[in-house]
Amino acid sequence: MDQTPQAPQPAADNPFWTTLRQPRVVLILLAVWAIIGAMTEFFTSSGVFVDLKGGELDGALGGRALGWEAIPLAVLYLYCSRDPVRYHRVFWLAVVEQVAAIGANSYHWGAGDFSFESVVIPVAVAAGLGVLVLLHLFQPKEQAGTAPAP
């Protein structure tokens, strides 16, 4: 019997991560995060979003409280999610936004304006969204006219 070794089959992509990395899904996640940021501006008396203690902003999402860019960014991300291929450049804006969010929260935490608990969630979410955006920006593009491998 002639038995030829078979080439190893690539591991199937996890459906959750495959869905999460779709451009439209990434843009909608960015929009949802921006909407949450806008909500922190309106519900400043809630300890969930922002807790004002003395001269310090506190609360689980206190680091998102001063981001007035949230409303127009949410609108932009939702608008661009209609056709992510056409509006591909919006992902570069998303990278800038996430890096700025991480930098601003880190600065204000270091300066003593925010407690660690106020910046840990915004920084973690910004880092996660930033990774998703970068993965999208630098994933190999399929050549026109070629079918993906089965």
Image (cartoon, grey):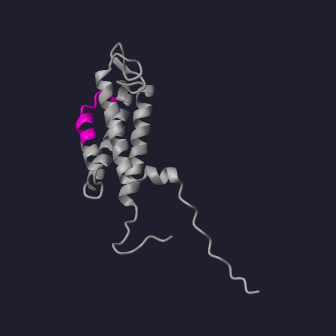
Q: Nearer the viewer, residue 142 or 50?
A: 142
What residue is shown at x 77% (from left), y 86% (from top)? Answer: 1
Pick the residue in front: 23 or 51: 23
Residue 54 lies, in percent from the top left, at 35, 13
Q: How many numbered circles are shown?
A: 0
Q: Would you identify the image quadrant in which residue 121 lies?
A: top left
- Residue 86 on image: x %, y %: 25, 58
Q: Report the residue that reaches farthest toward the right.
A: 1
Residue drawn at the location 72% of the way across and 83% of the way down: 3
Q: Is residue 66 magenta?
A: yes
Left-right relation of 82 to 3: left
Q: Residue furthest left?
A: 72
Closer to us: 87 or 106: 87
Q: Residue at x 28, y 28 (%)?
A: 66
The residue at 24%/44% (across/down) is 76
**Farthest top residue in view:** 54
Q: Is residue 71 above or below residue 82?
A: above
User: What's the magenta region?
Assistant: 64-75
Magenta span has 136?
A: no
Q: In the figure, 88 relative to 28: above or below?
A: below
Instruction: Check the image and report above or below for 82 versus 56.
Output: below
Rendering coords of residue 125 (x, y %): 42, 39
Relative depth, front residue between 7 and 15 = 15
